[in-house]
Image (cartoon, coloured by chain):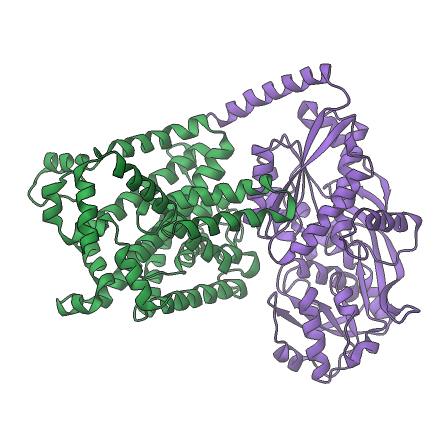
C-alpha cells in the first residue's frame, strides 16, 4: 500500500471519534451523550463526574460486569492464560491501535518497546541472574523501566516520524530487529540468548500477584485504565490535533501545529502504554529472552490490532482474545502439525471479508440491522450520514 | 485466594471420581498424557520426529499402559520458553493430563521444570531437552529426565581427541546454553589430561558469515572443535574450505549429522575420521538398536531414513513413563507416589543402552564416540569407535570436583593455559 493510499484508507476509516472531533459542537447538539469529552462548561467535581458518567452506556456496564465476574466462574487456566494474557497483549496492541488508527503511523516496534520495558525491569529489579540485575525494589524498578521505555519509544518516534506509510513500517521493523539482535548478542547487559528468568511479580496488599486471580485483576485494572486513557486522548486537544495531522499534515502545519512534535509525543504516549503491557507480560511469563521481542512477536501485535479492527480502541482487546484463544485451542481442532493452518486461515478470512477486522464486521451487521430497525438512536445515524457526505 | 481451596476441592472430586471409575470401568479407561514438542519455528522438523518417537513407544504396546488406554494430548511450542510453558499449562490445567512429556530444547526444559514446581500433583517427564541446569540447579521433585544431557554426551571425546594427537584445539561454537554444556563435557577430561583450548569463538545462532572467525584461527593448532548445528555447521565448513583451511575437525553431538556428511566440497575426503560423540549413533551394532530402527521405518513412511536423536530421546522418555504406568497398574492416586517410585526404579535396556536415573532424576547412560567412515557404497556415516558406559551428570568427576568447576558457560571451564 502506498503512502497516499494508506492515508486515504485511514481518512475514510476515521471512526466516529474522528467525526466527533471535527465538529464537536455540532455533535454535542445532536447526540450529547455519545462521548466522554469533559465539557469545558462544567467546573467542580460533580459536573465533571456527571459528565463522565453520561458517557457510560449499558454495554460498558455489561462488559465490565462480565470482566469482573469472569475469574470467579472460569478455571484458573482460563483466568490466567486466556484472560490475563489477552488483556496484557491487548494493552500492547492498544498502543498500536492509537498510533496507527489515530496517528496514521503503523509502528512494528510496539512489542520492542514493551520488551525493552520488560528487560529494564529485569535489569533494575530482581531476576535469577544476580550478576546483572541490580536488585532494586520492584516499585522503583517498575517506575524506571516504564520511564526508560517511554524515552526509548520517543527516540524511535523521533527517528521514524519523517517517514510515511510503508516506510514507517520499514524503519520501525528495522529498529525492532536491531533490538532483537542486540538483546541476543549482548551478554553484559541483556544476557544474550538466555535472557532473564524468575522475574517474580510483587506481592501487593497481601496478594501474591503470581496467583491467577490477583494477577488477572491487576491486568484488568491496567487494561481498563489504558482503554479509558486512549478514549480520553482521542477527544483531548492533543488527540484531535493528531488526527488532523494524520489527515492532512501540511494543513496542520500551516495552522501552526508542530507536526513532528505531535508525532513524537504520540510515540511517547503509546510507548508508555506498551511499556505497561510489557511489564505485565514479563510478570505473566516470569521471564524475558530475545524470543519475546523477535520478529514473530512484533508481527503478532500487528495481527492482533488488525484482527480486532484498527479504528476503535476496544478492537485491540477483541483481537487479543481471538488471537490467544486460537493460539491455545487451534491444536485441538486440527491434529498435530497442521494447526497453524487454522490460525492463518482465520486471520486470512477475517482480513479478507472485513478489512476493518472483527469490529468492522460488527459495525457492518449493526448497520444492516439499523437499516431495518430504525429506533437505533438518531445521533449515530445522523453522524453516519454526515460522514458519508464528506 | 481461592485457588488453593479450588485445587483442594477439585483434587478431592478428582480422587473420588478416580476411585468410582476404578470400581466400574476396567479395560477401556482412558488416561491422558500430555506431549509437548516444537511443531513450529526453527526446530519444527526435529519436533515432528520427536512426536514420532513418542508415538512409537505407545504403538509398541498397542496404545495401552497400566491397563488403561493412553491418549496423547499434543501441544506445541516454537522453541521459546514462554511458549513451552503456555503449552504445558494448557495441557495440565485445561486438558487435565496426569503425566506430561516434553519439551524439546534446553531453555524450554528449565522453564518447564520451574513450572513443574507449581503443579506438585502432576508428573513431568522430559522430552529431549538437554540443559544441565534443569536437573542440577534447584531440581523439581516431579521433573524426570531419562535421557542424558549435553555435557554427558561429550564425555570421553576429550581423551579420544588426545589419543588422536590433538593437543591444542580452537573452539567455534554457538553462543547459548546447549553448546556451553557440550563444550564443558569435552573439556572436563580434555583439559585435565593436558589438552589446551587456545581460544574460543562464540558465534550467534544462525550465523551466516564466518570470515572473521576463520581469520582468527591460529596456525599452530592441531584441530578445530566445532560445536555448531544444522546449517551453521555446513556454512562454516564451506567457508573454511574456501579460505584454504586444512585442520581436522572434532564435532559436537548435533554437528556431524546427515547434512554435513552429504557435504560435497573438495574437502569431503578430509571429513573422514572426524570424531564426535552423542547418546546414540546410526550405526550401533546391537539387536535392540536394529529393532528400534526397523520399527521406526515400518511405522513412519514419512519419517527420516533413520530415527533422529530427538525421536530416540522422546522414545526412551515416553517408554520409561509408560513402563512405570504398567508397573503400578495405572495407579496414580496418593499424589502419584507409587508411580514416582516406579519411575525412580526405571531400568530397562533401551535401543542405545540401559536407561536409568540418578537421585536428581537425571539420566545416567552410555555415550558413543564416533568417527566419520566410508560405507562400501561410497556414502559417509558415523562409525561407533568407542562406548563410554554409565556417564553421570558430574561427568565422571566427584560431586565436589564438579561443583568446583561449576556449570558450563562461555568462560567455564577456561582451559587456555
For image coordinates 65% across by 82% down, the residue present is B215
| Total number of numbered discs in the rendering | 0
**Residue B122 horizontal side relative to residue A132, left or right:** right
**Picture layout, residue B238 above or below residue B285:** below
Instruction: Report x, y in % for residue B408.
Output: 67, 58
**Front-most of B357 and A66?**
A66
**Residue B180 visible in rendering:** yes
**Front-most of B221 and A17?**
A17
Instruction: Report x, y in % for residue B145.
Output: 72, 44
Instruction: Report x, y in % for residue B74.
Output: 65, 41
**Residue A384 horizontal side relative to residue A286, left or right:** left
For image coordinates 49% across by 41% down, the residue present is A325
Q: Which chain is purple?
A: B
**Residue A124 visible in rendering:** no
Chain A tint as drawn: green
Instruction: Report x, y in % for residue A105.
Output: 32, 62
- Among all residues in the image, which is located at the extreme front? A372
**Picture layout, residue B269 above or below residue A199:** below
The quarter of the image holding the N terminus of chain A is bottom left
The quarter of the image holding the C terminus of chain A is bottom left
Instruction: Give the quarter of the image for residue B228.
Output: bottom right
For image coordinates 47% across by 37% down, the residue present is A80
**Front-most of A387 and B314?**
A387
Amino acid at each position: 500500500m502506498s503512502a497516499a493510499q494508506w492515508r486515504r484508507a485511514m481518512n475514510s476509516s476515521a471512526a466516529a471519534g474522528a467525526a466527533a472531533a471535527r465538529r464537536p459542537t455540532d455533535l454535542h447538539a445532536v447526540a450529547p451523550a455519545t462521548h466522554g469529552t469533559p465539557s469545558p462548561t462544567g467546573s467542580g467535581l460533580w459536573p465533571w463526574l456527571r459528565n463522565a458518567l453520561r458517557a457510560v452506556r449499558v454495554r460498558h456496564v455489561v462488559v465490565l460486569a462480565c470482566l469482573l465476574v469472569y475469574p470467579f466462574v472460569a478455571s484458573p487456566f482460563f483466568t490466567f492464560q486466556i484472560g490475563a494474557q489477552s488483556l496484557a497483549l491487548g494493552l500492547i496492541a492498544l498502543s498500536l491501535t492509537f498510533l496507527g488508527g489515530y496517528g496514521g503511523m503503523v509502528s512494528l516496534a510496539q512489542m520492542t518497546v514493551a520488551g525493552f520495558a520488560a528487560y529494564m525491569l529485569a535489569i533494575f529489579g530482581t531476576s535469577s541472574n544476580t550478576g546483572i540485575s541490580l536488585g532494586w525494589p520492584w516499585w522503583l524498578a517498575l517506575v524506571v523501566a516504564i520511564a526508560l521505555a517511554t524515552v526509548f519509544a520517543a527516540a524511535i518516534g523521533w527517528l521514524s516520524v519523517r517517514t510515511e506509510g510503508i516506510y514507517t513500517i520499514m524503519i520501525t521493523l528495522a529498529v525492532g530487529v536491531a533490538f532483537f539482535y542486540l538483546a541476543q548478542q549482548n551478554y553484559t547487559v541483556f544476557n544474550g540468548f538466555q535472557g532473564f528468568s524468575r522475574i517474580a511479580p510483587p506481592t501487593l496488599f497481601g496478594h501474591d500477584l503470581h496467583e491467577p486471580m490477583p494477577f488477572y485483576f491487576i491486568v484488568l485494572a491496567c487494561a481498563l485504565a489504558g482503554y479509558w486513557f486512549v478514549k480520553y486522548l482521542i477527544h483531548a486537544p492533543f488527540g484531535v490535533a493528531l488526527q488532523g495531522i494524520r489527515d492532512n499534515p501540511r494543513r496542520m502545519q500551516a495552522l501552526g501545529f508542530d507536526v513532528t512534535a505531535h508525532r513524537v509525543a504520540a510515540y511517547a504516549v503509546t510507548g508508555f502504554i506498551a511499556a505497561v503491557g510489557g511489564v505485565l507480560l514479563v510478570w505473566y511469563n516470569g521471564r524475558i529472552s530475545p524470543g519475546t521481542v523477535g520478529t514473530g512477536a512484533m508481527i503478532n501485535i500487528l495481527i492482533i490490532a488488525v484482527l480486532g479492527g484498527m479504528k476503535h480502541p476496544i478492537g485491540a482487546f477483541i483481537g487479543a482474545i481471538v488471537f490467544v484463544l486460537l493460539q491455545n485451542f487451534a491444536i485441538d481442532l486440527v491434529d498435530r502439525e497442521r494447526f497453524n493452518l487454522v490460525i492463518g486461515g482465520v486471520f486470512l478470512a477475517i482480513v479478507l471479508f472485513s478489512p476493518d477486522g472483527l469490529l468492522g464486521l460488527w459495525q457492518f451487521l449493526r448497520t444492516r440491522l439499523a437499516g431495518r430497525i430504525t429506533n437505533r438512536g438518531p445521533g449515530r445515524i445522523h453522524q453516519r450520514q454526515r460522514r458519508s457526505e464528506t | 485466594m481461592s485457588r488453593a481451596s479450588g485445587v483442594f476441592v477439585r483434587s478431592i472430586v478428582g480422587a473420588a471420581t478416580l476411585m468410582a471409575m476404578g470400581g466400574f470401568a476396567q479395560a477401556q479407561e482412558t488416561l491422558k498424557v500430555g506431549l509437548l514438542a516444537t511443531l513450529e519455528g526453527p526446530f519444527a522438523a526435529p519436533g515432528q520426529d520427536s512426536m514420532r518417537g513418542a508415538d512409537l513407544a505407545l504403538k509398541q504396546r498397542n496404545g495401552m499402559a497400566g491397563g488403561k488406554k493412553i491418549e496423547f494430548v499434543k501441544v506445541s511450542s516454537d522453541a521459546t520458553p514462554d511458549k513451552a510453558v503456555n503449552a504445558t499449562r494448557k495441557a495440565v490445567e485445561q486438558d487435565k493430563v496426569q503425566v506430561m512429556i516434553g519439551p524439546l530444547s534446553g531453555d524450554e526444559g528449565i522453564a518447564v521444570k520451574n513450572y513443574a514446581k507449581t503443579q506438585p500433583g502432576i508428573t513431568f517427564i522430559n522430552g529431549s531437552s538437554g540443559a544441565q541446569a534443569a536437573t542440577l540447579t534447584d531440581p523439581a521433585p516431579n521433573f524426570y529426565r531419562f535421557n542424558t544431557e549435553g555435557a554427558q554426551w561429550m564425555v570421553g571425546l576429550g581423551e579420544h581427541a588426545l589419543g588422536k594427537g590433538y593437543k591444542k584445539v580452537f573452539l567455534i561454537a554457538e553462543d547459548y546454553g546447549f553448546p556451553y554444556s557440550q563444550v564443558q563435557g569435552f573439556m572436563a577430561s580434555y583439559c585435565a589430561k593436558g589438552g589446551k583450548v587456545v581460544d574460543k569463538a562464540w558465534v550467534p545462532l544462525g550465523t551466516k558469515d564466518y570470515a572473521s572467525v576463520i581469520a582468527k584461527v591460529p596456525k599452530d593448532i592441531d584441530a578445530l572443535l566445532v560445536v555448531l548445528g544444522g546449517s551453521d555447521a555446513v556454512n562454516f565448513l564451506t567457508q573454511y574450505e574456501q579460505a584454504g583451511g586444512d585442520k581436522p575437525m572434532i564435532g559436537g553431538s548435533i554437528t556431524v549429522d546427515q547434512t554435513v556428511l552429504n557435504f560435497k566440497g573438495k574437502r569431503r575426503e578430509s571429513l573422514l575420521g572426524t570424531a564426535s560423540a552423542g547418546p546414540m549413533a546410526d550405526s550401533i551394532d546391537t539387536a535392540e538398536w536394529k529393532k528400534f530402527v526397523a520399527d521406526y521405518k515400518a511405522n513412519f513412511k514419512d519419517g527420516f531414513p533413520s530415527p533422529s536423536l530427538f525421536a530416540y530421546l522422546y522414545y526412551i522418555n515416553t517408554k520409561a513413563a509408560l513402563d512405570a504406568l504398567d508397573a503400578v497398574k495405572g495407579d496414580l492416586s496418593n499424589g502419584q507416589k507409587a508411580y514416582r517410585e516406579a519411575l525412580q526404579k526405571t531400568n530397562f535396556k533401551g535401543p542405545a543402552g540401559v536407561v536409568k536415573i540418578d537421585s536428581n532424576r537425571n539420566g545416567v547412560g552410555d555415550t558413543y564416540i564416533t568417527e566419520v567412515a566410508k560405507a562400501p557404497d561410497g556414502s559417509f556415516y558415523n562409525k561407533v569407535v568407542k562406548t563410554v558406559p554409565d556417564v553421570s551428570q558430574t561427568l565422571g568427576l566427584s560431586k565436589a570436583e564438579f561443583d568446583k568447576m561449576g556449570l558450563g558457560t562461555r568462560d567455564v571451564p577456561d582451559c587456555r593455559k
